[in-house]
Image (cartoon, rainbow, N blue to C red):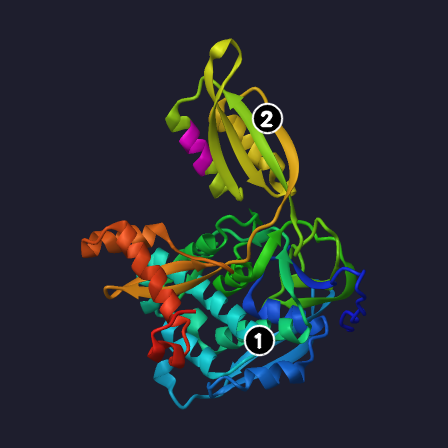
Amino acid sequence: MSTPESTAESPTTPAMQSVAWFHCFAGIAGDMALGSLLDAGADLDEVLNLLHRIPLDGWGLEVEEVLRGGMACTRALVTVTGTSAPSDDVGRTHARIAELVNLARLPERVTDRTLSIFDQLARAEGRVHRTDPSAVHFHEVGGHDAIIDVVGTAAALEVLGVDAVASSPVAVGTGTVRTDHGILPNPSPAVVRLLHGIPTYGRATTVELTTPTGAAILAALCEDFGPMPPMQIGATGFGAGAAELDELPNCAQVVVGLSTDPGSIGDGQPVMVLETNVDDATGEQLAHAVTRLMEAGAHDAWITPIVMKKGRPAHTLHALCDRDQTAPLREIIRLTTGTFGVRTLSGVRWPVPRGFAGVEVGGHHLTVKVGPERVKAEFDDVADVADRTGLGVHEVSSRAEEAWRRGQETPAEQREGGTR
């Protein structure tokens, strides 16, 4: 299949941004993401050239054309042929994987995307198992196949020249799945953690439709979730899952194209604001409503004190969400507050790109959120370290943010004592 053609730009023509939109109607896994991008035209030799920079022995990548539900797809299958360090394969740590990626000297965007995906995995696994993210031992997601799937996906996006990534709401299965941790619910706890805030829905199948690796790819890379954004479609591809399903094709679709729409990714994200005024809800009810809205996928939810007619004190409950979440969130507002009506306002938001990084304060790991012009320590981690060390939360935050800044210095800057 062909890739989007480049478009010449003039001083009066807005920049054309390349967008990849994943359609996760049957969920998504690492091999499905990689397969879909190869199917959409990412050159296999170029992807392999980048993958071979990783100092990791004993793997191969087989790419084959298959059918899923009668639909033509590409299957990306990582094979393990033996390794010079077999003990390093099982339970490989987050720190070890980050070391391998940094040693590979990949293009900057490939490195950043890969590290962001594994950081999402480490944070999710750390929360699920109450383990410091830096000490998390990956099992299924630490083996050769997951590493190749993740780096391969980031490499394929780079080969296709993709600037921004988006996704549809994500399908998950039900029942239970067997993992290295034993029998777990489907979707697994790590997948649920990774999909927090992402539009998600269930299908009546016991197959693990969305894996931790697939969920982490979306959580780390996607700037928008919802219907396909306005674009000039240049290519599409389907990545096959491992097995056939009776009820639908077991594959993930990617659509790649160019977008200049002012309401699309890169310039603004269309959103809805749901609101209701209530004067007979308790503080506990309102707090519960905010919690339920956030759990159901709202981008944000908050409460504003107001004065209604006849001087009655009251509150307005607000929820910011994607357009396709309007109906389910409106129902949550009705059920949690007992309101007789909900109104909507349409708008556009411009979220600032952000990522996450790990630092240490007093020998304890913290996560910091990093934006273009600032860094901020995650408060839950700050409070935990403050309790363990006896330091104040402001001091822990300050040390964590300074630790990140120091980590960004070059060796020369460190010798001179300067900061970036």
Q: Which residues are magenta?
A: 286-291
Membership of 307 in magenta stretch: no
**Disc marking residue 188:** none
The residue closer to the viewer here, 108 or 100, is 108
- In the image shown, does 100 or 73 lie closer to the viewer? 100
Q: Residue at x 59, y 26 (%)?
A: 342
Decide which of 173, 417 is in the foreground and name it.
417
Q: Splitting the image into 4 quarters, where does residue 270 fall?
A: top right
Report the amino acid beneath label 2.
Val
* Spatial separation of the CA atoms under disc 1 and disc 2: 45 Å
Image quarter of the C terminus: bottom left
Pointer 1 and pointer 2: residues touching (CB < 8 Å)? no
Q: Main secondary structure of the magenta part?
A: helix
* Camera sees residue 339: yes
Mark 2 element type: loop
Q: Which residue is mark 2?
A: 342
Residue that sits furthest to the left in the current view: 390
Q: Is residue 400 above or below residue 311?
A: below
> Residue 227: percent from the left, percent from the top?
68, 50
Residue under numbered circle 1: 152
Pick the front one: 134 or 82: 134
The residue that appears at 52% across and 70% down in the rendered structure is 112
Residue sitting at the far bottom: 84
Is 191 situated left or right of 344 in this image? left
